[in-house]
Amino acid sequence: MKKLFIFSLASATIVLASCGTGSQPPATGADTATTNTVPVTLPDPAAFHDSVDGQPTALYILKNKQISAAITNYGARVVSLLVPDQKGTPTDVVLGYDSIGKYIHQPDTYFGAVVGRYGNRIAKGRFKLDGKQYTLATNNAPNHLHGGNKGFDAVVWTGKQLSDTSLELTYLSKDGEEGYPGNLRVTVIYTLDSDALHVGYAATTDKPTVLNLTNHSYFNLNGQGSGTINNHVLQIFADRYTPVDSTLIPTGKIDSVGGTPFDFRQATAIGARVGDTGNIQIKYGKGYDHNFVLDPAPPVAGALSPRPAAIVRGDLSGIVLSITTDQPGIQFYGGNFLNGTNPLKAGKKDDYRSAFCLETQHYPDSPNEPSFPSTVLKPGEKYATWTYFRLSTK
Ligand code: GLA
């Protein structure tokens, strides 16, 4: 698990963002980036003591020399992630709220959550497994999104702090919950490891089911609520991506990113091509909201197959996020649906395109697309996947 791939942005070509925020009018203040002026701290755990569906909610704090994290068992959400910027100033790089009530009442963004049973979309809320048809909520009409009306982001997990740097969260998703078959026992372990947050996922089922877990943290490496992410510089280790239809369901084709705004093989400012609405995929996504097919993992004898997925650099903070995973895909979402209406920590706002998500995962709609890697989990099998979020200023 400790094998890390370290890549440098130094040699890569950097294409600077020349345009603003693309095709849509940004919310006020969204097209500029600012640095934080007030000291950044973790939220008060007392503001997370409540009960949802009769289950107690809490905020857990993980700390090591480099990183502090606050994680709630409501939706297994990363609430805060504090890391030093290039001047050593603590910077909170994820969007979140400062109380449990705000998470419960502003549910649609999935801030920091573990999403499941199925991360991203399933076409028309239907899939067949072993000849049987299953029907799910079409909560993102006409499709099913992120596990349905009450996915894993909106349930209370059982939390157990394993050490100062590690938290275990477990959840039993009952047979038939949100229309999915099988009693599914899920464990997520968050661990701080030097300059990284490691997320490990494990699950078993008692009936065949489909499963695609991911973490839906929204990052702004200049600090949450500090304006546009369009000048962050992004590299994605993917030659190919899965183009979508107008409802964001993959067409089943796997296309080359070459010559398109989806080519992030060289480090490029996120906003450099997001305004290219002549590209039908950018138009459908209202910007970036697409799954990239990660390049094949280099063979590692006797180990999991870790693969570099993406590297992002905050333009003002110098904070670099590098993501490594064993998953075959990554959904790059550029915050196109944020509009400044959600009250973030420290009185900040979630303006249009003021955060990005890089969700390591299987491809959307895999249960209906036999040519995609399978997301079926059967009794007796062990689901085990992981993702490393490394944060540094190098
Ligand atoms: C995912 C989806 C987006 C959007 C966000 C949440 O990343 O792909 O379309 O639904 O979640 O707003």
Image: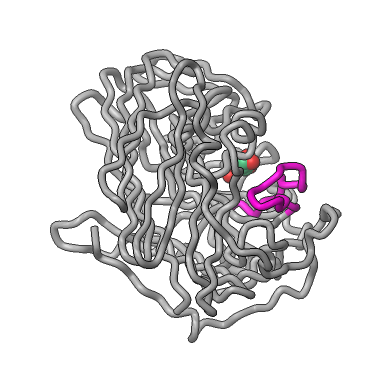
Position of the C terminus by quadrant: bottom left
Front position in the image: 73 or 369: 73
Per the rendered image, the range of residues in magenta is 333-352
Compared to residue 324, the image places residue 59 above or below, namely above
Front position in the image: 340 or 137: 340
Residue 188, located in which quarter of the rendered image? top left
Scheme of image coloration: one colour
Compared to residue 385, the image places residue 123 above or below, namely above
Compared to residue 121, the image places residue 129 above or below, namely above
Q: Where is residue 93 in the image (x, y as percent from the top left)?
A: 55, 59
Q: Where is residue 283 in the image (x, y as percent from the top left)?
A: 74, 51
Residue 94, located in which quarter of the rendered image? bottom right
Q: Position of residue 160 (x, y in %)?
A: 30, 36
* Residue at x-position 37% and y-position 51%: 62
Compared to residue 282, the image places residue 251 above or below, namely above
The reply to whether residue 369 is in sight is no
* Residue at x-position 34% and y-position 56%: 192
- Residue 56 colored magenta? no
Instruction: Determine whether, in the image, residue 189 is placed left or right of residue 369.
Output: left
Q: Position of residue 281 (x, y in %)?
A: 68, 52
The reply to whether residue 117 is in sight is yes
Across the whole image, how many numbered discs are drawn on residues? 0
Position of the N terminus by quadrant: bottom left
Q: In which quarter of the image is ligand 1?
A: top right
